[in-house]
Amino acid sequence: MNSELLSIGAVERDSGIARDTLRIWERRYGFPEPVRNEKGERMYPEAQLRRLQRIRRLLDQGLRPGKVVALSDADLDLLEASLYPEAPSNELIEQILSVLQTTDGSELETVLSVIYQQQGMQTFITETVVPLLHAVGERWATGRLQIFEEHLLSEVLTRFLNSEISAIQKTAKKPRVLLATLPGEEHTLGLLMLSALLSSRNISVVNLGAEVPLDQIVSAVERFEADALGVTFSGAYQYENIRSNLIELRESIAEGVDIWTGGEGAKRLRKLPPGVTKFTSLDKLPF
């Protein structure tokens, strides 16, 4: 990208922050600070776009605009350092990240397959995939991993795990677990890892994926005669809606069906609705 000034439309597109929000922040926090062209239109230096991209990454981790938008680059550095302390070096994870950032998806899938064959599903998820995703999240949040690289890993990992899960599920038996996220929750890697771990224990899984309407989840529980329902909430999900959604699910689903919840959003719940179980890590599943 060159050093020319950028239109508000370009900044909206490349930062993921709506132009109305940019105008509100400008008035409320004094940032961004556009200049005006000869037509009076807002134009933004590239440095402001980069800072807005950093802010967007922090907001995606659950921080509030009032705590972040007005910060200088130096203060953003300090905030990121406190949120993402440098993890101990992991040679295997560094190898995968190197392949991710220097080659294409085909070689990445080959590397994952070799590791999987050595570890088996449960160890692969808990000792490779979980720390890998943590490292990717930390590098993305601090600008050391590009968005397309994070998307590439997600695509390759999803394709690979779905293939292995499908093979295992051919012999899986009861209990049966239904997995889904509610509307507004687009993140599905948590569901996928949960599905993989349950499959490794020969548990039957029906994974409906992302953004399933609540009433349809209830219907699916009945249709598939599920013994348990698992719903996950990422840190980007509207926190104030999590508890009410879980209460509605509990009231709508037969008492004999267990309800589990997990993910960064659910971790913040101080009090769970009666009849809902929270798992704080993938190695502490109710089954």
Image (tube, rainbow, N blue to C red):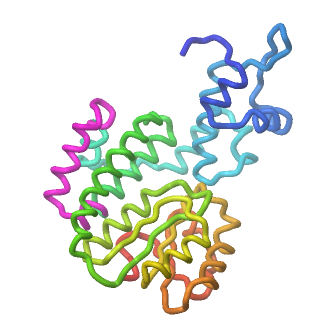
- Tell me if residue 262 comes above or below residue 14 in the rendering: below
Residue 186 in percent (x, y) is at 54, 54
Q: Which residues are magenta?
A: 99-125
Residue 227 in percent (x, y) is at 42, 85
Query: For residue 114: magenta?
Result: yes
Along the line of sight, the residue nearer the viewer: 227 or 197:
227
- Would residue 64 be found to the left or right of residue 199 on screen? right
Image quadrant in which the N terminus is located: top right
- Would residue 133 be found to the left or right of residue 76 on screen? left
For the point 75% across and 33% down, the residue is: 19
Residue lying farthest to the bottom in this orientation = 256
- Tell me if residue 84 comes above or below residue 143 in the rendering: below
Displayed quadrant of residue 219: bottom right
Along the line of sight, the residue nearer the viewer: 142 or 41:
41
Displayed quadrant of residue 287: bottom left
Along the line of sight, the residue nearer the viewer: 255 or 222:
222
- Tell me if residue 47 comes above or below residue 284 in the rendering: above
For the point 36% across and 58% down, the residue is: 130
Residue 175 in percent (x, y) is at 34, 84
Residue lying farthest to the top in this orientation = 38
Residue 105 in percent (x, y) is at 29, 37
For the point 49% across and 92% down, the residue is: 256
Q: Main secondary structure of the magenta part?
A: helix
- Label tally: 0
For the point 47% across and 36% down, the residue is: 147
Residue lying farthest to the front in this orientation = 223
- Tell me if residue 93 comes above or below residue 75 in the rendering: below
Query: For residue 167: magenta?
Result: no
